[in-house]
């Protein structure tokens, strides 16, 4: 498989596309005023300790306070299991498995200053998720202060190679810290690991000194910018080339690789084409498709992806695919194709949290297992931590995907001002019924014999062209003359009512609220 990293660095926005055989697999975006915060280390002050939630809220000097759960206390490090089983989660920025967490009220009190690291960005109304279990990722290792263990990434599967790497980093491990060998360390020797460990130790010493000399709340250490961090984390021997369109960023990447992986420098290229780089690699059309609700499968089926407040729902349909055999076989083939496409879409759109998949109902238990097995197999390619549960009695598959930031949809869009995020607006028929209720309220007030009603042009056209008779009947029934006005400034579901020749606004009194208005 051919892998490429394509970087478009503008003054306002940096976009990094990961291509697999020319197809967009991942897209990372960072704007100057919306810099990512995962990995940043702060000296914070505890604002509140909530024993009932086993959590604390910590002032980091940011607009929203950080959320610290008892399982992320420094004291929880003592209960960590063998790191050889959990280093992958650490490498991805995820949470580590551990025994029962200590009671938070026994270790934290209001006003206490603590060193914490952001593990999940602030999303919506929620503040950032933080931990006292600091980890510093390098090119080949992750350094963990306060842990006296070593581990090797589970993505390195060869047993002899795992033992070789573990022996190397065991000898290099300084006292008082833990080390985890990353996937990029496969095949590397003592010099590469030694240089990486030396670099990470220097960073930690600097963090430790700065933390001791400042008062909370204060930023102690800032994670690398998006481009540098992804080069560090993703640019492995499996990547065929990195192409970037910015000279300064190109120079920075070259300088970084010269220090840590000089053998990869030749794979980094500066794009000099006339077309925008994402146009040259046909990435822009693929990005546009990531915002579509419906995703067609190759054989004619499709999936629908819907975002709700608490979860993401994915529905699978046969669509145009009718198959050539029996119905069960057709459904199985559609579900298998969806099971391969859904993990791709989750990764591409960076969808995290709770996900519910409604596969097409199958009768044969072996077919259900086959679809679930295929889904789990495809999820293994995802760097984010995922977990898919068994098919429920209702035929649903519940799964989770690690979330560090908002999805691409939420990053690039906002709720529609016309529908409030519903994706729907009031129909013209609904607006006519709404008008009838408004006139009834005007009539009940007494004294008004003439009103001005303003609606969107398409609604006004519906009233006079398709419902003229009913409109006239309403005027006769309530004995109120209606001057209908089309107002291009009004949204489809909006209606305004005025009395006294348009001088007195009756809208609040007579027009009720309606979803999609």
Image (cartoon, rainbow, N blue to C red):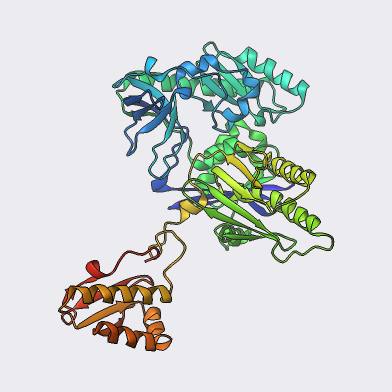
Out of 117 and 245, give the one closest to the viewer.
117
* Quadrant of image for the C terminus: bottom left
At x 51% / y 17%, what residue is drawn? 77
* Residue 139 makes an appearance in the image: no
Q: Quadrant of residue 217?
A: top left
Out of 458 and 85, give the one closest to the viewer.
458
Q: Quadrant of residue 285?
A: bottom right
Q: List x then y, in percent, for residue 138.
A: 56, 28
Out of 412 and 242, give the one closest to the viewer.
412
User: In the picture shown, does residue 195 fall above or below 408?
Assistant: above
* Residue 29 makes an appearance in the image: yes
User: In the picture shown, does residue 363 fall above or below 200?
Assistant: below
Q: List x then y, in percent, for residue 254.
A: 57, 40
User: In the picture shown, does residue 410 fall above or below 166?
Assistant: below
Left or right side of 285 for 491:
left
At x 69% / y 38%, what residue is drawn? 380
Residue lying farthest right? Answer: 325
Left or right side of 426 for 63:
left
User: In the picture shown, does residue 41 fall above or below 451?
Assistant: above
- Number of marks drawn: 0
At x 58% / y 55%, what residue is drawn? 305
Q: List x then y, in percent, for residue 267.
A: 66, 43
Left or right side of 136 for 367:
right
Out of 350 and 11, give the one closest to the viewer.
350
Q: List x then y, in percent, for residue 258.
A: 59, 34
Left or right side of 331 for 227:
left
At x 75% / y 61%, what residue is drawn? 299
């Amino acid at each position: 498989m051919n892998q490429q990293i394509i970087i478009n660095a503008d003054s306002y926005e940096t976009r990094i596309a990961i291509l697999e055989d020319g197809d967009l697999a991942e897209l990372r975006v960072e704007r100057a005023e919306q810099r990512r915060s995962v990995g940043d280390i702060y000296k914070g002050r505890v604002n509140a300790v909530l024993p009932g939630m086993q959590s604390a809220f910590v002032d980091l000097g940011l607009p929203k306070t950080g959320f610290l759960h008892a399982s992320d206390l420094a004291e929880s490090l003592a209960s960590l299991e063998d790191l050889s089983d959990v280093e992958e989660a650490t490498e991805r920025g995820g949470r580590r498995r551990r025994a029962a967490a200590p009671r938070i009220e026994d270790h934290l009190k209001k006003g206490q200053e603590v060193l914490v690291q952001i593990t999940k960005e602030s999303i919506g109304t929620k503040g950032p998720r933080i931990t006292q279990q600091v980890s510093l990722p390098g090119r080949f290792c992750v350094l963990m202060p306060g842990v006296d263990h070593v581990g090797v990434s589970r993505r390195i599967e060869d047993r002899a190679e795992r033992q070789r790497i573990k022996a190397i980093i065991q000898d290099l491990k300084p006292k008082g810290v833990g080390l985890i060998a990353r996937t990029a360390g496969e095949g590397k020797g003592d010099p590469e690991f030694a240089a990486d460990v030396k670099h990470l130790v220097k960073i930690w010493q600097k963090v430790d000194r700065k933390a001791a000399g400042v008062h909370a709340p204060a930023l102690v250490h800032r994670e690398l910018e998006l481009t540098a961090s992804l080069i560090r984390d993703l640019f492995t021997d499996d990547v065929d080339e990195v192409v970037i369109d910015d000279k300064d960023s190109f120079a920075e990447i070259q300088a970084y690789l010269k220090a840590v992986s000089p053998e990869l420098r030749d794979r980094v290229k500066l794009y000099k084409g006339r077309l925008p780089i994402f146009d040259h690699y046909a990435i822009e059309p693929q990005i546009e498709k990531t915002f579509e609700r419906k995703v067609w499968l190759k054989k004619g089926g499709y999936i629908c992806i819907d975002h709700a407040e608490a979860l993401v729902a994915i529905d699978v349909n046969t669509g145009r695919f009718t198959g050539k055999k029996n119905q069960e076989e057709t459904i199985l083939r559609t579900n298998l194709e969806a099971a391969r496409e859904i993990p791709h879409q989750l990764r591409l759109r960076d969808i995290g949290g709770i996900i519910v998949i409604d596969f097409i109902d199958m009768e044969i238990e072996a077919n259900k297992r086959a679809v679930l097995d295929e889904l789990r197999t495809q999820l293994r390619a995802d760097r984010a931590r995922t977990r898919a549960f068994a098919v429920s009695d209702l035929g649903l598959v519940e799964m989770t995907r690690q979330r560090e930031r908002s999805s691409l949809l939420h990053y690039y869009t906002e709720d529609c001002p016309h529908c409030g995020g519903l994706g729907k607006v009031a129909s013209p028929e609904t607006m006519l019924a709404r008008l009838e209720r408004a006139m009834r309220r005007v009539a009940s007030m007494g004294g008004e014999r003439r009103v001005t009603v303003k609606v969107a042009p398409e609604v006004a056209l519906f009233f006079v062209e398709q419902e003229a008779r009913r409109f006239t009947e309403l005027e006769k029934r309530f004995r109120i003359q209606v001057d209908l006005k089309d107002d291009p400034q009004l949204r489809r579901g909006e209606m305004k009512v005025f009395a006294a020749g348009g001088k007195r606004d009756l809208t609040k009194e007579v027009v009720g609220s309606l979803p999609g208005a």
